[in-house]
Amino acid sequence: MLARPHTWLAVPLPRAPVAPPDRPPSCCRRRSVVNWQRAKRRLTAYRGKTYSEKSGSGRKPFSQKGTGMARQGNKRAPIHRGGVKAHAPVLRDWSFKLNKAVRRKGLRVALSAKLADDKVIIVGRASAFTSSKTEDLSRRLEAVARASGIGDIAPAGGLASTTLFVVSERELTPQLRIAAKNLQRVELVPQLGCTVYDILRRDVLMISPDALEELQARLLR
């Protein structure tokens, strides 16, 4: 039997701890952090082999002169079948350095933007979830969204708005991972995995009180 959906509560949000500084939020700083995070995730799919890695003989195919054909020096040349690929992709590292102070300010700006848009929900008693059923979690999150008046509800039930659900490390149980794995519009992340890019690309931010305290500690370092 599914648990009653109102076992999770939408508690009032403390606005002061995540408020931005006195100056207006900087979109450039937020964009710098997003570019830094996306550059770190960027990878090269594969790389081509070089002459030293390609199998084959290094002997000259035929003599330099007297054949009437263009001179050739190696069977592994790109113009030969089975040779190396000209201008093949290489492994690259697109990551760049970004100061920790800029990263923290970017996170503050992203949280403040969600707060200003009234798109933040504090989910109380998230640690009480012990079921691994996706339907159970969907109903609980839907009840929290209805109680807070934030986010859209699908006609068939469930959340219609994309949601980032942030919990603390001790609240991230195996049952909660399994239940959230099949929710298409909900992304479950631990507090340490909450990034500026994830916050901005989701419509609603749901966070537990324990995760909020840990996030505030990160911002106040």
Image (spheres, rainbow, N blue to C red):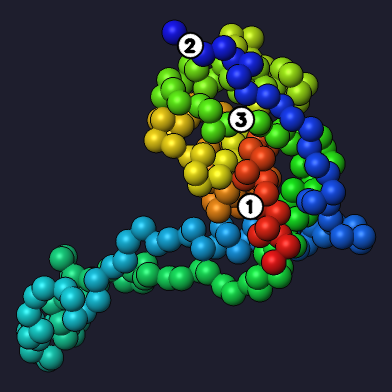
Mark with earlier residue (1, 3): 3
Count residues near mark 2 (Cα–Cα under 10 Å), then give few for <14, some for 14-19, many for 20+: few
Q: What residue type is labelled 1?
A: Glu
Circle 2 residue: 2
Mark with earlier residue (3, 2): 2
Residue 120 in percent (x, y) is at: 74, 36
Viewer-nearest residue: 46 or 164: 164
214 in relation to 173, above or below: below
Count residues near mark 1 (Cα–Cα under 10 Å), then give few for <14, some for 14-19, many for 20+: some
Q: In which quarter of the image is the N terminus?
A: top left
Residue at figure coordinates x 59%, y 9% from the top left? 156
Residue at figure coordinates x 60%, y 19% from the top left? 7
Circle 3 residue: 125
Residue 14 in percent (x, y) is at: 80, 42
Q: What residue type is labelled 2?
A: Leu
C-alpha distance separating marks 1 and 3: 16 Å
Q: Quadrant of the C terminus?
A: bottom right
Mark with earlier residue (2, 1): 2
C-alpha distance separating marks 3 and 2: 17 Å
Q: What residue type is labelled 3?
A: Arg
Circle 1 residue: 214
Viewer-nearest residue: 18 or 115: 18
61 in relation to 140, above or below: below
Residue 160 lies left or right of residue 11; in this view the side is left
Residue 97 lies left or right of residue 216; in this view the side is left
Residue 115, picture quadrant: top right
Residue at figure coordinates x 49%, y 44% from the top left? 170
158 in relation to 59, above or below: above
